[in-house]
Amino acid sequence: MALFVQKYGGTSVGSVERIQAVADKVKGFRQAGHDVVVVVSAMSGETNRLIGMAKEMQEQPSPREMDVLVSTGEQVTIALLCMALEARGVSARSFTGSQVKILTDDSHMKARIQDIEVDQMRAELDMGRVVVVAGFQG
């Protein structure tokens, strides 16, 4: 058994049908006995939509608030992918970066990962779950 980390960007999770296709792929890896961590971005076009709304509110929004705003797009995708996996009989758990303790520097809108605490993800994998994590901009 191997650990696979898969990343799916905006177009590959751009619709319900595409998220379901990703769930089918992930299910195949689980059925083969592998542990799977899936990192997903927001659905295609969602980040641009959110940025557009922010610019309607304020010409130059705070980078911190922009990070908070755009992260909501990834949260939608992680939840939908987990639902699609569960509907296929695959146990899954979604996490935001802060929930699994992905630690970054404090450069908003261009943060770099400094450390990842893997204990919680490993515990979920040991219970047979697929771990679905919100991706990062940049």
Image: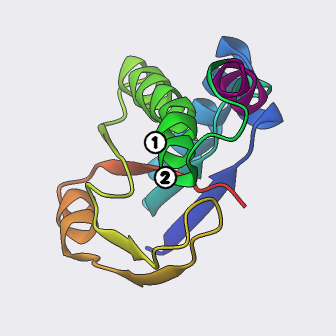
Q: Would you name the residue on which mark 1 appears?
A: 68
105 within the magenta span: no
Q: What's the residue at 19%, 66% (across, down)? A: 120
Q: What's the residue at 59%, 56% (across, down)? A: 136
Report how far apart the C-alphas of labels 1 and 2 lie in the structure.
Answer: 6 Å
- Residue 106, position as x, y percentages in the image: 46, 74
Q: Is residue 7 above or below residue 111?
A: above
Quarter occupied by residue 43 = top right
- Horizontal side of 10 relative to 79 (left or right) equals right
- Residue 112, position as x, y percentages in the image: 57, 77
Pointer 1 with pointer 2, Cβ within 8 A:
yes
Q: What's the residue at 56%, 31% (across, down)? A: 73
Q: Nearer the viewer, residue 7 or 68?
A: 68
**Closer to viewer: mark 1 or mark 2:** 2
Quarter occupied by residue 101 = bottom left
Three-letter code, disc 1:
Val
Q: Is residue 29 above or below residue 68?
A: below
The N terminus is located in which quarter?
bottom left
Q: What's the residue at 37%, 48% (across, down)? A: 96
Instruction: Decide: few, some or many residues near mark 1? Use Cα within 10 Å; few <14, some 14-19, many ≥20.
Output: few
Q: Nearer the viewer, residue 53 or 14?
A: 53
Badge 1 marks a residue whose secondary structure is: helix
Q: How many marks?
A: 2
Q: Would you name the residue on which mark 2 appears?
A: 64
Magenta: main secondary structure: helix
- Residue 76, position as x, y percentages in the image: 49, 25
- Residue range in magenta is 47-56
- Horizontal side of 23 relative to 116 (left or right) equals right
Three-letter code, disc 2:
Arg
Instruction: Decide: few, some or many residues near mark 2? Use Cα within 10 Å; few <14, some 14-19, many ≥20.
Output: few
Find the residue positioned furthest to the front: 59
